[in-house]
Image (cartoon, rainbow, N blue to C red):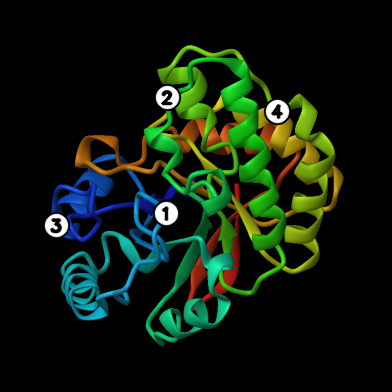
Amino acid sequence: MYLIDYHTHTRLSPDGEVPLYQMAEAAVRAGLSELCVTDHYDLVDQDGKPEPNGYDWPPALEQWRETAERYRGRLTIRLGLEFGSADRDPKRARETLEQPELDFVIGSLHNLTPAAGGGDFYFVNYTAPEVCYACLDDYFAQMLRLAPLPDYDALGHIIYPLRYMCARDGQTVSLDRYQEQLREILRTVAQTGHAIELNTYNGRTLADWTPVLALYKEVGGELITVGSDAHRPENVGKGASAACELLTQAGFRYVTCYEKRQPRPVRL
């Protein structure tokens, strides 16, 4: 089985811990064939204020070049970026992504809109279902705006807020009321040639993806990447094998890799 992890973070992310070579070594131990480093860059900070500085490409390029050469023949390492809130400033998004060595971009949403407070979903205290649904209303409204844009390759962790609402804060909300919005989002993704990301959240949220995959399949979606969202070496590749099994069960034949922003389907 060709195992990949297309969502990982190094010390170049604000919440990362180690250099890329340590994540690569973990990927080899986990039996991966391909690793993509996707350090964070958001157009807004954790409070929702515009990020004044551009992405610092030189250190990202340096560690990727060095590590890719070091592991040549043992592990394919791609250069990616997890790009947050591209819908806030599409012009600046395109300027950020004008990097010829870039292989892959995750399009993510981490923050509420300014009208809803602007903060990262991580910092919300989900004390009641009403709080959760207000945040989810805001989240999917943003995703509808992001989906048709060209500034990403795979739409990132579609079920992102649930990891904090349910797994962390014990709420029992679901995405049932968002089925029509999700259908529109996923149809747009499929029709524009983008992928979605099956984000395992370090192997913890696989079951939650079953209805999303069914809906994506229903609207004609085919391109899917797999990522652990690992910020530490011990989480690299977690859930990758189970994710491939889940994709097979959902009727998909391929997992998708990227090189220079071009998709390459690999048979499961």
Find the distance from the CA under tag 2 to the CA under tag 1.
16 Å
Can see residue 205? no
Question: Which is in the foreground here, disc 1 or disc 3?
Answer: 1
Q: Are marks 2 and 1 in contact (CB under 8 Å)?
A: no
In the rendered structure, which disc, 2 or 1, sits on the residue that comes first in sequence?
1
Secondary structure found at label 2: loop
Q: Position of residue 74 (x, y in %)?
A: 26, 60
- 38 relative position to 211: left or right: left
Q: Which residue is mark 1?
A: 48
In the rendered structure, which disc, 1 or 3, sits on the residue that comes first in sequence?
3
Q: Residues within 10 Å of mark 3 (few under 14, many from 20)?
A: some
- 93 relative position to 68: left or right: right
The amino acid marked with disc number 4 is: Leu
Question: Which is in the foreground here, disc 4 or disc 2?
Answer: 2
In the rendered structure, which disc, 2 or 3, sits on the residue that comes first in sequence?
3
Q: Are marks 4 and 3 in contact (CB under 8 Å)?
A: no
Q: Position of residue 13 (x, y in %)?
A: 25, 56
The amino acid marked with disc number 2 is: Asn
Secondary structure found at label 3: loop
From this view, report whether residue 159 is shown above or below residue 37.
above
Q: Which residue is depicted at the point 71% across and 44% down?
A: 252
Q: Which residue is depicted at the point 55% across and 15% down?
A: 128
In the rendered structure, which disc, 4 or 3, sits on the residue that comes first in sequence?
3
Q: Which residue is mark 3?
A: 19
Find the distance from the CA under tag 2 to the CA under tag 3.
32 Å
The amino acid marked with disc number 1 is: Gly
The amino acid marked with disc number 3 is: Pro
Secondary structure found at label 4: loop
Q: Specify the label residue 125 is tagged with.
A: 2
Question: Which is in the foreground here, disc 4 or disc 3?
Answer: 4
Can see residue 133? yes
